[in-house]
Structure formats: structure tokens, C-alpha cells
Amino acid sequence: MREPSSLYSVVMADHEVPRGLPLVAGLTGFADAGTAVGQVTEYLLSTLEHRDVVVFDNDELLDWRARRPVLYFDETRITEYTIPTLALRLATDELGAPFLLLTGYEPDFAWEGFARAVLDIVERFEVSSTTWVHAIPMPVPHTRPIGVTVSGNRDELIEGFSIWRPRTQVPGNVLHLLEYRLQQAGHPTAGFVLLVPHYLADTEFPFAAVTALESITAATGLLFPTDRLREEGREFLGKIETQVEGNAELARLVGTLEERHDSYMEDNPLRSPLTDEDGELPSADAIAAELEKFLAIRRSADDDPIV
């Protein structure tokens, strides 16, 4: 078995990394509904001070042919090459509190090796807790706050924030595996899975990013600047509402989702906010199809696109 450290390089001196910091993780590449993780990582890296601590080896973890890098061709020559990056960074929140931030692509290979490598890093830097975010599409209405499912071993977060607790099989991602290994090691860990309206799953939904940041704050006490995202979210929802209000069928379908959501939140006997009494989704697919079609139709020259 290879050493975990063979998958990464430490690029910051050990003594420069404070011990006992929380670790926040968000990796892109699988079911990032509303581009929540993508927005959060871009937002944090563009607004917070940060430095690389650990950089993972692309040739060991990335399938280059499946996710080809972007190069810029300028008439006669290649002038720029965008290198994919999976890295752990030392960052500071809005008030200057330090934390570790793991961002980048989800590895294509060596998942167990990657999990062992992160556990090695957690031990090396005496990480106090690990929090990760993920987002999946669900037939829930955009007119209600985005809910979350919380996993891990931090019972106070599960009790306080997890609105949907299914017993089911799910397609895993590498952070699921990491959470499982961290739990086995007795390390405090929590995963927040955002339940994003599935008819907005392919858009860049700013409130999904806001909810992700709020979840991280709940788990770590870190504070992040969200004013810009909130304003973008209000504008986004305003455009959605304008289009829904102009179509009676869409309004009826969204109303159906609202009723199911509200009845579930009021402890109605429904098994989940996603199904009717028979466990079926008779209108969910219709809602997605109708809204996706409606949001893609011709708009007047004065209308701004929402996506």
C-alpha cells in the first residue's frame, strides 16, 4: 500500500500552519445542483485571503481524457494552459479567523488513497473538525428556504438542521467516503447536503451558495461576506417569479410543490417532502419539464436571461 503522502505535496512550512483549525471542504464534479459548491469555492477564493498548504497530484487523481484541461489558442500558438487544481489552503474568514479550505475537482482515481491522505493531513495539522457541503436536485419549491440533510457524527447539527433523514442507497462521492473514514477515526465531521429545486439545478442559483455558507457557519462559527450573493439571489428569484406569475399552469405546479413542502414541514404523515401519500411523484417531473421549457422559451429583447 502506498504512503498517503505520495498523493500530495506540502508547499507551506509546517510551522506556518496553526494547529487545531476547522477544515471546510467542497469538491466539484458530481451533482452540484444550483452550482452551489462551485459558487461557494469561487466566492471564498475570490473574497478571502488564502495560501496553498497542500497540492494534490493531478497525474495520480485526475482522468485527463474525461475532464480535458482548457488551453487558449491564439492564432498560431498555445498561449495559456489552465491547470486543474485540488488543494488544501490556509484561509481567513471575514473577521480574520483562520481555517483550512479543501477545494477543487473530485478525484477520478484512488478514492481510498485520497481519503487516507486527507486523514493524514487531519492528523498532521491536528484539525479540530471537518465540514463539507454538497447539493442535489429535489422536487421542492423555490419559494421556500433551501433545506439540508446533515450527515456525520455531530448530533447537535443533525438535530438542529437536518429536515430530511431518509433511509436509502445513494450514489456516493469521495467526500461521503472521507466522512465515513473520519467517523471511523472518531473525528468530528458533518456533511451538509442542500436540497435544491430540481428545475433550478442546472442554473447558478445564488441562494444555494448562501445556504451552503450558512451551513458552514453553523458548523464552524466562521463568518463569510454574503451580501453580494444575497442581492444576486433576490434578483434571480425576482426574474423567476415574474415568469411563473405570467403562466397559470406553472403557478399551479409550483403551488403543488409548496403544499407538499409545507405539509411535510408541519409533520404531516407524508414520508418526505418529495412524495405524495402513495410515495409517488405525479407532478414533479411535470414541474421540472414545464419550468425548464418555460425558462428556455423566447424572451423579449428587454428581458435579461436568468441563466
Image (cartoon, rainbow, N blue to C red):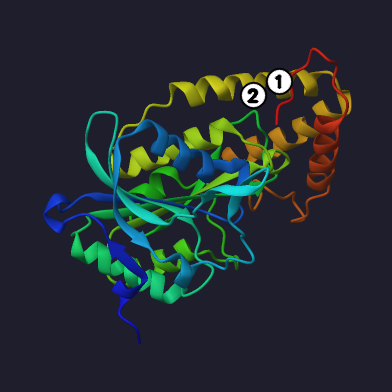
Residue 186 visible to the viewer: no
Estimate how packed mark 1 is, as few (under 14), some (14 to 19) or many (20 or more) residues with alpha carbons within 10 Å: some
Quick one: quadrant of the N terminus? bottom left
Q: Residue 239 — which label? A: 1
Q: Is 294 placed above or below 271 here?
A: above
Label 2 sits on a secondary structure element that is helix
- The reply to whether callout 2 and callout 1 are in contact (CB within 8 Å) is yes
Q: Quadrant of residue 7?
A: bottom left
Please state which of residues 61 and 227 is positioned toward the viewer in this rendering.
Answer: 61
Number of numbered labels in the structure image: 2
Query: Quadrant of the image for the C terminus?
Result: top right
From the top left corner, tell me how far across and down residue 236 is, in percent: 64, 24
Q: Is residue 274 left or right of residue 301?
A: left
On screen, residue 207 above or below 238? below
Q: Position of residue 202 (x, y in %)?
A: 69, 42
Farthest residue, direction left: 15
Relative horizontal placement of residue 144, taking residue 131 as reference (left or right): right
Q: Nearer the viewer, residue 21 or 113?
A: 113
Q: Which amino acid, mark 1?
A: Lys
Q: Amino acid at mark 2?
A: Phe
Image location (x, y in percent) of residue 12: 21, 54
Q: Is residue 148 visible?
A: yes
Residue placed at 62% from the left, 19% from the top? 235
* Residue 219 placement: quadrant: top left
Q: Label 2 belongs to which residue?
A: 236
